[in-house]
Amino acid sequence: MELETLITFIVYLIGMLVIGIIMYRMTNDLSDYVLGGRKLGPGVAALSAGASDMSGWLLLGLPGAIYASGLAEAWMAIGLSTGAYLNWQFVAKRLRVYTEVANNSITIPDFLENRFKDRSHFLRVISALVILLFFTFYTSSGMVAGAKLFEASFGLPYQSALWIVTIVIVSYTLLGGFLAVAWTDFLQGILMFITLFAVPIVAVNQIGGWDATVQAVGEISPTHLNMIEGVGIIAIISSIAWGLGYFGQPHIIVRFMAMRSPKDVPKARFIGTTWMIIGLYGAIFTGLVGLAYINTQDVSILSEYGISVVTENGVQTLADTEKIFIAFSQLLFHPVISGILLAAILAAIMSTIDSQLLVSSSAVAEDFYKAIFRRHATDKELVWIGRVATLVIALIATIIAINPESSVLDLVSYAWAGFGAAFGPTILLALFWRGITRNGALAGIVVGAVTVIIWGDFLSGGIFELYEIAPGFLLNLIAAVVVSISGKSSDGVEEEFDKTVAELHK
C-alpha cells in the first residue's frame, strides 16, 4: 500500500475515535447510551439508518454478487429499496410516537413489554434472546468484511486483520454509545454515497464509455445483462422478499425511536430513500462494470495487494468476487483518493457493526440485567454493563468470523431473515392492530425465529430454496393473529393503543 493511502486511512480511523471520545462526555445515562436522548435530526437519523442498514454488504457483498451472477441479483435491490421506503412511510412515525406513549420505551424488547403490559417479562427476555442470537451472526458478517478489506489493502494475514477491525470498532462504540454511533454513521453515510456514485463512473470512462462497457459485458457473459434469463420464480421471490426484513431490524428501527420529533419523519424519509436508491444502483453498476474492467484493462498490479485474478474458460475473474470494490480503489485512483475509498468500505462495515453491538448490549443491560437481576440498577451501572456486553458480543462474533472462507452475503442473509421473520410482523401488528395480544406477539416471534432456523439450516431443495424470511414472516403473521383472536389483551393495552392513534392525528 502507498504511504499516502495508509496515512489517509489512519486519519479517518482517528477521526472516528475522536467522535467517540467527544460523545463519551455527552453520554450520562442509559437513554443517552442506547437512544441518544431522542435528539436526532432528520438528516442524521436518515443517513444513520441507511449506513447501519447497508453495511459492508453494499460495498462488498452486492457488487460481488452482481460481478459473479449479473443483473439476476438486482432483484434484491428492488426488494430492499421498496421495503426501506415502506418502513419509513408506515413504521417510522408510528413507532416514534408509540414508544414514547408506552412508558418511554428505549429498546425493542422494552417497547414490546410495555406495549402488551407483560409483567412476567417473558416477552422481553425472548425478544432479547432473538436479538442476541441473530446479531451475533450479523456482527460476524461485518467482521468478515472488515478483515477482507484489511487483508487486501495492507497485505495482512486474515486473522490479524480480523482482530484489528474488532479493536477499532469496539473502541468508539464502547466510548460514545448511541450518539457516537449515530454521528459516525452520518459521516460514513455521506462518504459511502459519494464513493458509490463516483467509482462506477470513473471505471466506465476508463473502459471507453457506457456502450463499450455494455458490449464488453455482453461478449463475456450475455446473461449478466438479463434480469430474467436463467432466474426461476423462487429466486425472484426470494430476492424481493429481502424487503420484508426492514420492519423487524432493531438496529434500523431504533433510529425512528431516537428522532427528536415525529414531524421530522417526512424529511428523513426523503433523504433516506434517495440515499439508498442511489447507493444500491452504484453497487450494482460497480459489480457489472467490474466484470468488463477486469477483462479489458491491465490489472496485474492487483497481485501486489494480494487480490488474486484467475482465468476460467478464457475469462479473467477475481478469485474472490466480493473484493471488486477494493480492486477498483487500487486500480483507478491516486493513493490519497484510494485511502478515502478504502475508508468508505470500512465506513460501511463500521456503521453496521457499531449499531448491532449497541442494540445487543442494550438488550443485555436493559432487557436481561435490569429486568431480571437488578430492577433498581443505576443508569451508570447499566451503561457499564452495556459496555461489557459490547466487548463480549464482539469477541464471540469475531470467533465465528475466524474462517477466511466465510461469505459476507451468506451471513447477512441469515441474520436479516431472522430479524425480519421474528420481529417484522410483530412490530407491524403491534403498531396497527388494536387486537393483538401479548401471547399472540410471543407466538409470532417464536414461530418466525424457529422457522428461519429450521428452514435455513435443515431443509433444502425445491420449495425450500425459497429465502427463509418469506415463510418465517408469513407463519409469524398467522401465529400472531390466530393466538390473539383466541385470547384477550391485558388491561389498559387497547386504551393505550387508542391514545397513540389520537397522538398521531394531532
Image: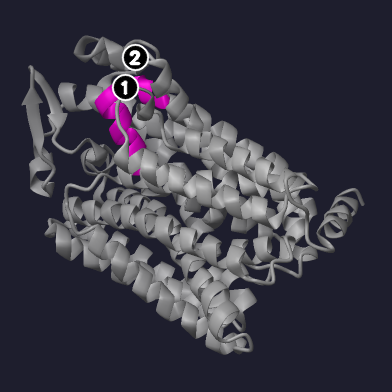
Q: Is residue 248 above or below residue 460?
A: below
Q: According to the image, label 1 marks what residue?
A: 70
Locate residue 151 relative to residue 271 in the image: left or right: left
Q: Residue at x 30, y 71 (%)?
A: 167
Residue type of the residue flagged with mark 2: Leu
Q: Nearer the viewer, residue 198 or 252?
A: 252
Q: According to the image, label 2 marks what residue?
A: 225
| Residue 366 in view (yes/no) | yes
For the image shown, how many numbered marks are present on the structure? 2
Q: Residue at x 47, y 71 (%)?
A: 361
Locate residue 388 relative to residue 323 in the image: left or right: right
Q: Is residue 65 magenta?
A: yes
Q: Is residue 366 magenta?
A: no
Count residues near mark 1 (Cα–Cα under 10 Å), then give few for <14, some for 14-19, many for 20+: many
Q: Main secondary structure of the magenta part?
A: helix
Locate residue 33 relative to residue 226 in the image: left or right: right
User: Residue 326 location, x and y as percent?
Assistant: 25, 44
Q: Residue at x 49, y 73 (%)?
A: 364
User: Residue 347 location, x and y as percent?
Assistant: 40, 55
Secondary structure, mark 2, is helix
Q: Quadrant of the N terminus?
A: bottom left
Residue type of the residue flagged with mark 1: Gly
In magenta, the rendered stretch is 59-74
- Distance (Cα) linking label 1 and label 2: 6 Å
Q: Is residue 240 above or below residue 47?
A: above
Q: Please tell me which of labels 1 and 2 falls first in the chain.
A: 1
User: Residue 449 location, x and y as percent?
Assistant: 47, 49
